[in-house]
Image: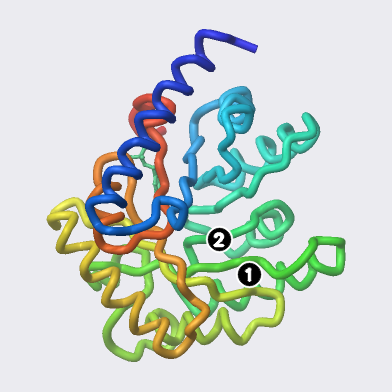
């Protein structure tokens, strides 16, 4: 183990936990109701093991090609983690993701919900314990050309409530709530207020769907103020990533 790297991650983790605690205190919330998902994309499995040794139980990845071998490597090392899939998911990767993920944050169409439901049913037959948790990924600005389910309208494949119903109707999936990324050109507090509004609409129909996955390294404070239950933090823990490959 690289002691220097572990020390650096430990210091970053302490700072992130402080930020979450301060934002929660300011919002009158219990920090224990906020789950830190450490986003480990582009970083090696060794960093995941450092995080696990420091008490992190939830890790996030956005590409199956990268996540699957890391999940296998950490499992082989005897480390038990909850893997969160947070990236755009192609339907032909659903089977792989259902074999290791605890929660998929990025379900944004009825077609994807159906494919993931079928993949999770198959994974259950192959020994996966329990249903696969799933979130409806929202398009905060409602732009249909970007990813995310549409908060308004009644598009048969992309409307937010239709995606929620497709997840809830799949026996191998469990609808847990919503996820969003704040659009670059929106102020974070405005974006997360819109996420909170959408989360409440989903909860009105599905009271158990209480998860709000929102907030990244740059905007976790605003997300916690607006009710995030899961924050997805990468660079503040592990350092700046090289530009997108
Ligand atoms: C990379 C990523 C994150 C983490 O972003 P940071 O700014 O590094 O904290 C969170 N959510 C999603 C969907 C991501 O792709």
Residue extending farthest right: 126
> Around disc 2, counting alpha carbons within 10 Å, would you say few (fewer than 14), some (14 to 19), or many (20 or more)?
many
Q: Are marks 1 and 2 in contact (CB under 8 Å)?
A: yes
Task: Answer with the quarter of the image where residue 93 lies.
Answer: bottom right
Percent across and percent down for residue 34 are 43, 54
Measured as percent of width and height from the top left, residue 237 is found at 41, 30
State the image coordinates of residue 24 (x, y, percent, origin top left). Answer: 31, 52
Residue at 61% across / 74% down in the picture? 174
Q: Give the structural element (helix, strand or loop) at label 2.
A: strand
Q: Is residue 179 above or below residue 96?
A: below
Which corner quadrant holds the N terminus?
top right
Of pointers 1 and 2, the one earlier in the residue sequence: 2
- Give the residue at mark 2: 104
User: On screen, 167 above or below 86?
Assistant: below
Q: Which mark is residue 42?
A: none
Residue at (40, 82) in percent of width and height:
202
| Residue labelled with disc 1 | 116
Q: Quadrant of ligand 1?
A: top left
Mark 1 or 2, which is nearer the eye? 2
């Amino acid at each position: 183990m690289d002691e220097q790297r572990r020390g650096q991650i430990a210091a970053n983790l302490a700072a992130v936990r402080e930020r979450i605690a301060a934002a929660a205190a300011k919002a009158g919330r219990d920090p224990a109701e906020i789950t830190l998902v450490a986003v480990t994309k582009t970083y090696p499995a060794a960093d995941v093991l450092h995080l696990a040794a420091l008490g992190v139980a939830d890790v996030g990845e956005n590409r199956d090609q990268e996540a699957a071998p890391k999940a296998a490597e950490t499992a082989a090392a005897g480390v038990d983690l909850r893997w969160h899939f947070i990236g755009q998911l192609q339907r032909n990767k659903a089977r792989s993701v259902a074999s290791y993920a605890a929660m998929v944050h990025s379900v944004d169409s009825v077609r994807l919900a159906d494919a993931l439901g079928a993949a999770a049913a198959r994974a259950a037959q192959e020994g996966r314990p329990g249903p696969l948790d799933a979130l409806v990924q929202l398009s905060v600005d409602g732009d249909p050309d970007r990813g995310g389910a549409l908060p308004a309208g009644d598009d048969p494949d992309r409307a937010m409530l239709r995606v929620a119903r497709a997840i809830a109707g799949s026996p191998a999936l469990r609808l847990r709530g919503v996820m969003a990324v704040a659009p670059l050109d929106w102020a974070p507090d405005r974006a997360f207020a819109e996420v909170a509004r959408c989360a409440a609409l989903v909860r009105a129909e599905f009271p158990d769907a209480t998860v709000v996955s929102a907030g990244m390294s740059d905007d976790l404070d605003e997300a916690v103020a607006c009710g995030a239950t899961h924050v997805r933090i990468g660079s503040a823990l592990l350092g700046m990533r090289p530009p997108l490959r």
